[in-house]
Image (cartoon, grey):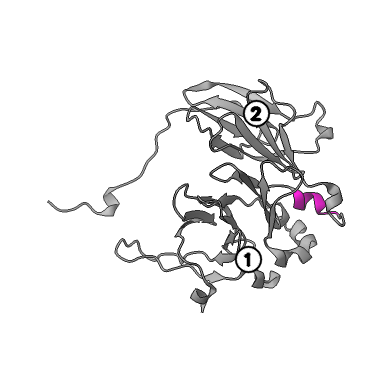
Amino acid sequence: RSLASKQDYQMTSTLKRDYAGAHSYHIHSISINSDNETFISLDSLRVNLWHLQQEAQRYTIIDIKPKDMTGLTEIITSGTFHPTHCHTLMYTTSRGRMCLHDLRSSAVLKEPARNFEIAETAYPTKHFFSEILTSISDAKFTNEGRYVLSRDYLSLKLWDVNMEHKPVQVFPVQTHLSGHLPMLYHNNALFDRFQCAASPDGKQFATGSYSNNTIIQSRKSDAVALGAPPAPSQFSMSKPNPDPKISNPSQFEYSTTKFNEKVLLCAWHPKQNIIACSGTNRLGVYEQKKISYEQDK
């Protein structure tokens, strides 16, 4: 009996439940609760709470839609549940706020239990692009739930859940682009929404950038950039994929940046040092080893 070739197998999916009709706008975030029974879905103005077994019923627990849409000044950009406290959730906004809510406080959540935001007085100067740059595109709790990692266009920020007025660490990202904001605005690159992820021990962080680079930032050392893996010419289980190119993000230049090749999505394995990131039409999965610039020589 001969072994079946890989062409004999095809991965398919089957729809089990359809949670429909609850959003008027594009759903940009979904988060499973630690109780393994409920989840939230988020669009730009609402957060809905669902039970996994009851697709026909949902509860709108947060609604920031104004009565007059001309008065809209803020939208929801991402959201997630706390990793261990099933009653705690957080969402981020286009005004640079992270709102922490407790489901036990009310059926409909109005004012957040904690509001993480850098005061406007902390910024030395304001300009036309200030509000866009402060918009938070993504935020994630670390595994133990003590810290929150947020991503805006030019930085990663690490927040302590017990300190609302400022982050405990700020890691610059894409500093080579900060002098070219007008051009980035006109080609819409300034509105790209990059995700972020934290390692299982909460000591390293990952986020995407342009030119198919994934940035790995440590709390105690400089960042490194992982280039996109080479496109395989033929599927092979016997040959390991070559290591990605490793470079120093501080040496990136605007003139060589490929804005059509961007890594917007990334995730870190909850227990292992394995990172998945998506750039253009490829998914890269990296197993972290000892990273050094020497590998690029």
Q: Amino acid at mark 2?
A: Asp
Task: Point out residue 179 in the picture as x, y percentages from the top left corner.
Answer: 78, 66
Task: Point out residue 21 in the picture as x, y percentages from the top left corner.
Answer: 59, 26
In reply to whether residue 133 is colored magenta, the answer given is yes
Q: Is residue 39 above or below residue 168?
A: above
Segment tinted magenta in the rendering: 128-134
User: Horizontal placement of 153 versus 214: left or right?
Assistant: right
User: Horizontal placement of 88 versus 68: left or right?
Assistant: left
Please identify the residue farthest to the front as the structure is shown.
Answer: 162
N-term-proximal mark, 2 vs 1: 2
- Tell me the number on the disc at residue 102: 2
Chief SS of the magenta region:
helix
Residue 23 seen in the current view: no
Q: Amino acid at mark 1?
A: Lys
The image quarter containing residue 162 is top right
Q: Residue placed at 59% from the left, 26% from the top?
A: 49
The image quarter containing residue 221 is bottom right
